[in-house]
Amino acid sequence: MGTLLLIAGLFVFGYRVLPLVFIVALVATVLDVREVIYQLGKANYVVAFLAIGVALSRLATVLVSGLAWRTSHRQIAPVAVR
């Protein structure tokens, strides 16, 4: 549910909320990796497999939002052509 709110925030507010998306996705990824380790320790491999899928999708979100945030800082102001 929180991820959907972040996506809605991106549509409404644009790049201004991109740092928030990056930070929340990074924290969620760390917690998902922790869950994978916990489930593997309990020998619950099916749940661990699902948690790996979730962690990979969150990692992709971290990478894409990080790259977008980085390129948004590098953009040069457009120059008016006469």
Image (cartoon, helix red, strand yellow):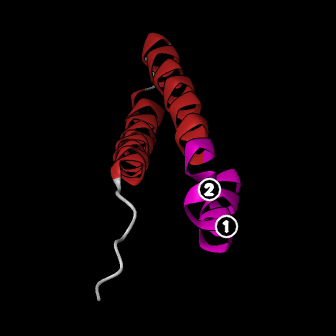
* Three-letter code for the amino acid on which mark 1 is drawn: Phe
Image quadrant where residue 48 sits? top left
The correct choice, above or below, for 3 with respect to 60 in the image is below
Residue 61 lies left or right of residue 67; in this view the side is right
Q: Nearer the viewer, residue 71 or 25?
A: 71
Secondary structure under tag 2 reads: helix
Q: Which numbered tag is attached to residue 41?
A: none
Q: Is residue 6 magenta?
A: yes
Residue 52 lies left or right of residue 38; in this view the side is left
* Residue highlighted by disc 2: 16
Extreme residue toward the front, this view: 82
Which residue is located at x 52 percent, y 15 percent? 38
* Residue highlighted by disc 1: 13
The correct choice, above or below, for 34 with respect to 17 in the image is above
Which portion, as a residue range, is magenta? 1-20
Which residue is located at x 58 percent, y 66 percent? 14
- Label 2: few (<14), some or many (≥20) within 10 Å? few
Q: CA distance from mark 2 to mark 1?
A: 6 Å
* Coordinates of residue 32 in the picture (x, y in percent): 51, 30
Image quadrant where residue 78 sits? bottom left
